[in-house]
Amino acid sequence: MALDFYQYSRLTAEAQARLASEMIAAGRLGSIGGVYVPLLETAVAMRTGRAHAIAMSSATAALEVNLRALGIGAGSEVVVPALGWVSVGTAVTATGAAVRVASVGEYLTPSWDQVASVLSPATAAVIIAHLRGMAAAGIARIAAELRERGIPLIEDCAQAWGVPAAGSHGTAAFFSTQAYKLIATGEGGIVVCDDPALTAGIRALSGDTRVRTPEPVWRGNTRMPEITAVLAIPQLERLDTLVEGLRAVQRPAAELLGKVGAVLPIEGSNGSHVGVWCDTPDAAAALSARLDALGLRNWHPRSGDLHICDAWPVQGGSSPDWGRYLDIQIPYLEGDDQRAFLDLLRQALAEGSA
């Protein structure tokens, strides 16, 4: 399969080029005084049902500034899941806070009991990730339990564009527009929240000089430029169509993968992945190699993978046997191309049973 089948941003290239031309002609390149960053923020806030959205230079920057705006720093602890991108912990430690790692189960995210086991009087926030295009299992209960204890929940929605209700449970949530996301601009991030004071704090710390604060603060520069918003807006407008197309391929792919192991539920996902627990690490590794040979993108965690806490400076908790896990990325295809993709997947599975 050609790799561009996985580059979802190509689907709106014409609209992106038109907006970029208009932006360049207008000469407004920065978010302050620009037009497209506010348009993107409004659209994301409306889509997620949150009162405010703040566009940033990256999802990592969005998380760090969010934590700082919550007053988190030295002496605080932040709970993160044992599976997620390494920069989540980076953002936490950049504030001076300590990372505590919560165990995860076979649904890739922690349960409430696993979160509760690492809470302490120093816990200042909990981060829960919606991974591989799926909503985190038990997120509603986790949000309710933390709300009762007065502990902010921050949702990591970097991989969750188009997942229903993702970003609506926590004190705040952040999305990514990095190159491999459903909305891809190369780099970029967006924070959503409801609290006006938190919003003002995030904007000020990100470098928005128009926002006043009760007392002076050091302001950085993590603002999203206009060109990034220009690339994101057409993709956001087409997101529902993209998800519908992905899910049309995801469903039969999940049925096929069910023949080699336990497939994670796909209902309510954005269609971008199908995860399966194979019987043995060898079976998962062999299937991954066959998929690679056919040009089908997949993720099979191996030692040193930066998504897993074993490769981080701070470990903790426990995890399933990641050697047994594999997921396959779903490309955006239509008509005969959909059938060709599924035929290649059948071929990879048949070779394994031969």
Image (tube, rainbow, N blue to C red):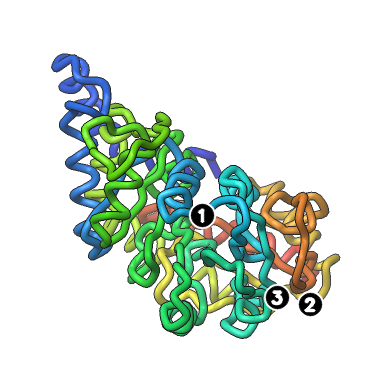
| Residue for point 20% across, 51% down | 43
In which quarter of the view is residue 18 placed?
Answer: top left
Q: Which residue is mark 2?
A: 279
Give the label, 2 or 1, closer to the camera.
1
Q: Position of residue 158 (x, y in %)?
A: 47, 53
Name the kind of residue labelled 2 in the image: Asp
The answer to whether the residue labelled 2 contacts the one labelled 1, judged by CB atoms less than 8 Å apart, is: no
The answer to whether the residue labelled 3 contacts the one labelled 2, judged by CB atoms less than 8 Å apart, is: yes
Q: Which residue is mark 1?
A: 72
Closest to the observer: 278 or 195? 195
The first of marks 3 and 2 along the sequence is 3
Name the kind of residue labelled 1 in the image: Ile
Secondary structure, mark 2, is loop
Q: Which residue is mark 3?
A: 260
Name the kind of residue labelled 3 in the image: Val
Q: Can residue 276 be seen at all in this image of the molecule?
A: yes
Closest to the observer: 299 or 319? 319
Classed neighbour count for the residue bearing mark 3: other residues with Cα under 10 Å, few (<14), some (14–19), many (≥20): some
The first of marks 1 and 3 along the sequence is 1
Secondary structure, mark 1, is loop
